[in-house]
Image (cartoon, rainbow, N blue to C red):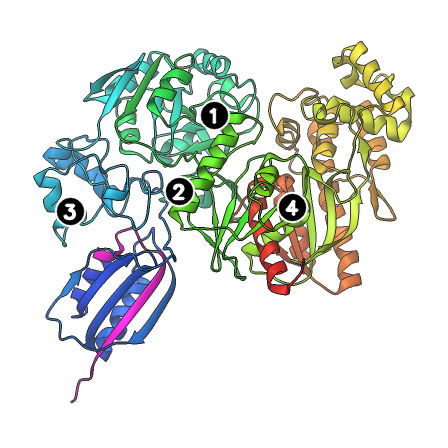
Amino acid sequence: MNVRYSAHLIHISGLVQGVGFRPFVYRMAQKNHVVGWVENNNEGVTIHAEASDLELERFISDIRSLAPKASRIESVRVSAAESNGFQDFTIRKSENLSDAVTEVSPDIAVCEECLADMKLQSHRMDYPFINCTHCGPRFTIIKALPYDRHLTTMQPFSMCPLCRHEYENISDRRFHAQPVACSNCGPSYFTDSRNNKLIVHDPAQHLGQWIDQGSIAALKGLGGYHLLCSAENETAVARLRSRKQREGKPMAVMVPDVETAKKLFELSEDEADLMQSWRRPIVLLRNKIPLAPSVSMGLNTTGVMLPYMPLHFLLFGQLKTRAIVMTSGNLSDEPVAIDDADANNRLSSVADHIMGYNREIHNRADDSVCLIVNGRERMIRRSRGYAPAPLPVALDCEGIFAAGAELVNTFALGKDKQAIMSQHIGDLKNAETLAFYEEAFSRFSSLFRFKPSLVACDSHPDYLSSQFARNLNLKTIEIQHHHAHIASCMAEHSLDEKVIGIALDGTGYGNDGTIWGGEIMVADLTGFDRKYYFDPVPLPGGDQVTHEPWRTAVSYLYKYFGPEMISGNLPFLKQIDPNRLDMVHQMLFKNINCPMSSGAGRLFDAVAALTGLCTKSLFHAEAPMRLEAAIKTNCKGKYHVDYVGKQIVFQAMFHQIISDIKHGITVGEISAKFHNTVSSIILTVARRLREETGTEKIVLSGGSFQNRYLMGLTEQILNDQRFSVFAHHQAPSNDGGIALGQLVIAAKHRASGLP
């Protein structure tokens, strides 16, 4: 039998660097008797492979099916090559080929093998920076591509002979693990007091004592500092809230394992799988056994995560408490601290103790936040563990910069048919966050060799992100906010056609100069037709209504029932200072500082205030969150609304809600009926537009769809009516996903030759 031997050049693109891909390829080559070489380059991984045709076929099949869990193969291109008569298989030094780039791995939670090594290897016994090719810091330490040690913040640490041997041993799990280190040569923790740094050899013991004693600690994490305290100590949590200037927003917690999570929270299999994934996001879970009241501030859910750094596991080995608060190391609305001196300056007024380490964080990355709805992962904040892994798109986006929105900002860079989305930046409301935005743009541009040639931004005239984009002095496409929302979800699902778009959020600049936010449109990537919208109401005081939802409730009452309703005996009005109530009455009467808004978020605010759940908001979206938390889940009732031309009018609904309040109907039932009404509106307009346009594809986007009940119910009833429903999974439905929509709209405009 004649055996045919061949030589192939194999190009692999995707997330294939920093995840142990070359050693994996080496092992597959050994297994299949393949000779040749593999190398990293800034275009991906390239392999020269020589073997029999059958062995080459098995080799390529194994690469596809057995790749490391944190890798993601986008493409495998195979071409014929000349045989060089290699005798073995080798791993070559990284090459720099062109301006094309490979993907940068997100940070990866510490693996089980490394946790075992912490108890077995003498030079890594309880060493809190243990890592290998399967786990450890990636994005947060990288400065440039290709991903080699001298281009990361590990460059100052010279490997000891033991680590060097592992790093160079092709059969070792730490072969070419760029952050490889041990207690002899790697980073170390220190306590920091007034910039006096004292090396700590047992950081977990110190932290455990501080936390169990009721103290607050600032701890340097993978992508920035965290503030920690016992989540079962109300005094400590309340003190942390006061010092951090975080009056009402819930705080995330960390628990040691899934078993503990099951004791404290309702936990489905899908939620457990997500929590245990290598990305280790914060997952929103329903409370079962209350922690300290100041953790969740009366809400029925908590953001929960599992340990992902070696030190976290060591810490829970010392702690008596079952859960710790793990919140961002910053003051309210500021970026999380990453620099040790900055942390000491900013966090010393919050933390009783500060613990850092002597390795630089180059790229800031907050914890990511997700939830599960209808068995699917939904992104709320995309950062550590996800960024900067790109999202594939169907259009050529090369050279397009999308600036994003104002709140929960991310931006996006276009490379070929990929959207490289930044980590979570935050609300662009102060100089510090804007500086972070500008720094991140500069670093992403350098890292991914990006030179913008076309810019996309929100059409709002005052957004700082849009001002930054315009100041680049390149051709700029200004995009309506809610069109970008719909396009963002379309991009996730590779849709490039007309769809029914439902965009529900709080605020977006409308084409008519008013505030939009309850929008039903027929849209594609070139434009949209606004088919229906929520009945606009004046917002007395403009943005002040987001802090005082009672103002919007009063505005709806004034619009639908006149001023006499404001002076009525509705219970929520008794919570309002009569002088302030009269001031708002005068503003509405004289139309002073009362911009018009169709925002869905403001409607939720109004109902939350009307029911007495939240008349004053201490943090963004508190009123809708409290309204959702109050839902009586087995209630199927709903309220009546009217369709007047393009407007969806809520007068009848408010009349019925007021009647329910007067007749003693519970807030839980009122909340359920309201949410059911919003889902019913979506179904009604979807049916009408399907009949009008013939399309059955419906896209859901906007911050209101972070509401677990609304999202879950809406998907179910639309699916029951045989719509093809598309919702967000990889990008946030809130404004953190806007940049993705801006990117693909700009790409479509360019491809179509539109202005």
Q: Residues within 10 Å of mark 4 (few under 14, many from 20)?
A: some
Q: Considering only order in the chain, which callout, 2 or 4, is on the residue closer to the N terminus?
A: 2
Which quarter of the rendered picture does the C terminus lie within? Answer: bottom right
In the image, which is nearer the foreground, mark 4 or mark 2? 2
Residue 305 lies left or right of residue 183; in this view the side is right
Q: Position of residue 173 (x, y in %)?
A: 18, 49
Residue 338 lies left or right of residue 516; in this view the side is left
Label 4 vs label 3: CA separation? 52 Å
Q: Residues within 10 Å of mark 2 (few under 14, many from 20)?
A: many
Q: Position of residue 387 (x, y in %)?
A: 43, 44
Q: Considering only order in the chain, which callout, 3 or 4, is on the residue closer to the N terminus?
A: 3
**Tag 1 near tag 4, CB within 8 Å:** no
Tag of residue 713: 4
Taking the image as drawn, is residue 385 in sight?
yes
Label 2 vs label 3: CA separation? 24 Å
In the image, which is nearer the foreground, mark 4 or mark 3? 3
Residue range in magenta is: 1-23
Secondary structure of the residue carrying numbered label 3: helix
Tag of residue 385: 2
**Magenta stretch contains residue 725:** no
Label 1 vs label 4: CA separation? 26 Å
Return the residue nearer the eye: 482 or 258. Answer: 482
Secondary structure of the residue carrying numbered label 4: helix
Tag of residue 167: 3
Q: Check disc 1 and give the amino acid type.
A: Ile
In the image, which is nearer the foreground, mark 2 or mark 1? 2
Q: Position of residue 542 (x, y in %)?
A: 74, 26
Disc 1 marks which residue? Answer: 289
